Image (cartoon, coloured by chain):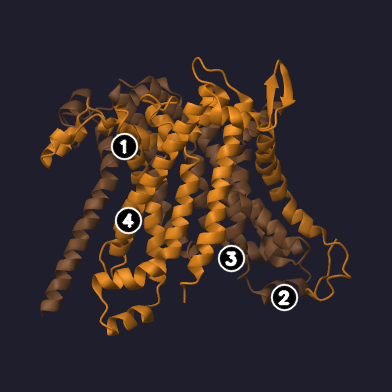
Amino acid sequence: MNPRETMMDVSELKRPRRWHILVFLTPALLIYTAVMILPLIETLRQSFFNTVDGEYTFVGLGNFSVLFGDPRWASDFWNALRNNVVFFLIHMAVQNPIGIALAAMLSVPKLRFSTFYRTAIFLPTLLSFVIVGFIWKLILSPIWGVAPYLMDLVGLKWLFAPWLGRPDSALIAVSLISVWQYIGIPMMLIYAALLNIPDEVIEAAELDGITGWSQFWKIKLPLILPAIGIVSILTFVGNFNAFDLIYTVQGALAGPDGSTDILGTLLYRTFFGFQLQLGDRSMGATIATVMFLIILAGVSLYLFVIQRRMRRYQF
Amino acid sequence: MSKARTSLARTGAVHFALIAYTLVALFPVFLTIANSFKSRNAIFREPLAVPTPETFSLIGYETVLKQGDFIGYFQNSVIVTVVSIALVLLFGAMAAFALSEYRFRGNTLMGLYLALGIMIPIRLGTVAILQGMVATNLVNTLTALILVYTAQGLPLAVFILSEFMRTVSDDLKNAGRIDGLSEYAIFFRLVLPLVRPAMATVAVFTMIPIWNDLWFPLILAPAEPTKTITLGSQIFIGQFVTNWNAVLSALSLAIFPVLILYVIFSRQLIRGITAGAVK
């Protein structure tokens, strides 16, 4: 079994079956298909089935109409979806501008300690949600009083409130914790994009008298738009699939009063049950299918519309 | 002259802003670790102070090590992470080699099929994954977690590694073929050593989400003997909410391994992100 294939790609058709290709591909394909693709398809399939009168039958889009319309499910679902959208919008509105600003500052030529800043600011991204969630829960806790103490130093103590415990501010607080954790990723990707801008472009701009702020807005920002696009789609997928942070900070019920409930926590409660609620496999599969469609829509929009349009601006 | 001064002022402002954000990023971690070494009174009286000889106390760590089986959790996490990374690297590199080296029918399609998993999260299949694990009696085993994480890590690994393998010189491989090396020998003895830097990048990228994951341990392996450190500390902290020493110590214990790994691998990780991400 030693194929003497010294003639590459020439006598491809005449060669005996190249078993080694199969050997190289099989392990990865097998695990990937069996543990990821098939369960995904099976989950999508189960969203069309439910138990009716003790029998497991095909119900068509029945589960979906229950999820979107039945009073027992619909309010929870729309609440979770709305919260998830807000969660995403807060990420986009806070994380991207700060990420761009940090990246722009880091890319100032010959900046000292820039490796240290980069390493330090990226650190939270590596911590698990459990650690991040609990740390911030402690810091924001009125019992410990670290947050009010710090705010007192800058004379803002009157602003302090137990943000995580109030329905009107809990979602914003949790989103900002998540932004704090993930700021490293936009910072890094945009930093890399800024470094990739050819020096000639910058020099040409300087010769034309475009420097400082206007250089950033007119030259650099359009050139890093593709990186911002990647960051946005990564954030989108991550946000509509998020679970751990909310589970850690607010529990499976995503309190107070469901104000931080997003699709991930709703899926968990629905599928596995929580306290008095019994687990429901079919509705769990239905929610997972909705999440799949949302993510698929976002990714397709990015790949087929946004990314294509962006290419045209590139040199 | 005045230009030099304004640029000095600007650099100053940049440093100021970056230092400010660095503090925001590091402060919570510092606060947790510093307070984990203090007595209960000191934690509340002066949360911002570093531990002094008078306030120093290891009571939190004693509680954690006595109550929770943290060493066991830690072991589970290490086993799951190391075995998953090894499988991802081996199988991912093999598949990447097949896709980048040989021309065969369905090559592009296969590449796209494997790339699907980069964007679609594996979590969405949880309902059926759990059923499959129940059917094969793998619930509450580390094998279940290893299988899931291997499947989760493969798409990105294949993608990154096949990009790198395209850069390995054809002449080298053909020279190997003329010398009578089998395709397997070419892969293991010629190509793998050359893509080692890329393997390191993939390893770091694969490791972080596995080590930090809460979802799959919670669902597939919540039993005491198979808890990972992330799930273990989550449950432990949930039970000891009022024991601040124990909570802070448990958090610190969960932070240390990540900190140590980051110090070792940070350069690799950052280089990986900044080189691979933007074309």
Circle 3: element type: helix
Q: Residue at x 41, y 24 (%)?
A: B236
Which sits earlier in the primary sequence, circle 2 or circle 3?
Answer: 3
Specify the subunit that label 4 lies on: A
Q: Which residue position is annotated with label 4?
A: A97
**Left of B240 or right of it: where is A21?**
right
Identify the mark at residue B58; answer none if there is no mark: none
Q: Are marks 4 and 3 on the same chain?
A: no
Instruction: Give the distance between the C-alpha atoms of the residues marked 4 and 3, in whole angstroms.
Output: 32 Å
Marks 3 and 1, how far apart at CA? 41 Å
Left/right of residue B106 with respect to residue A150 in the rendered view: right
Find the distance from the CA under tag 2 to the CA under tag 4: 52 Å
> Spatial distance from mark 2 to mark 1, Cα to Cα?
60 Å
Determine the secondary structure under disc 4: helix
Query: Residue A173, labelled with which disc?
Result: 1
The location of residue B197, given as percent across then percent down, is: 53, 62
Which chain is rendered orange in the image? A
Q: Quadrant of residue A287?
A: top right
Q: Is residue A146 above or below residue A280?
A: below
Amino acid under label 3? Phe
Please give the residue where the numbered disc 3 appears in the rendered image: B164
Residue B110 location in percent, x, y?
Answer: 71, 57
Left or right of B134: which side holds A206? left
- Residue B201 visible within the image: yes
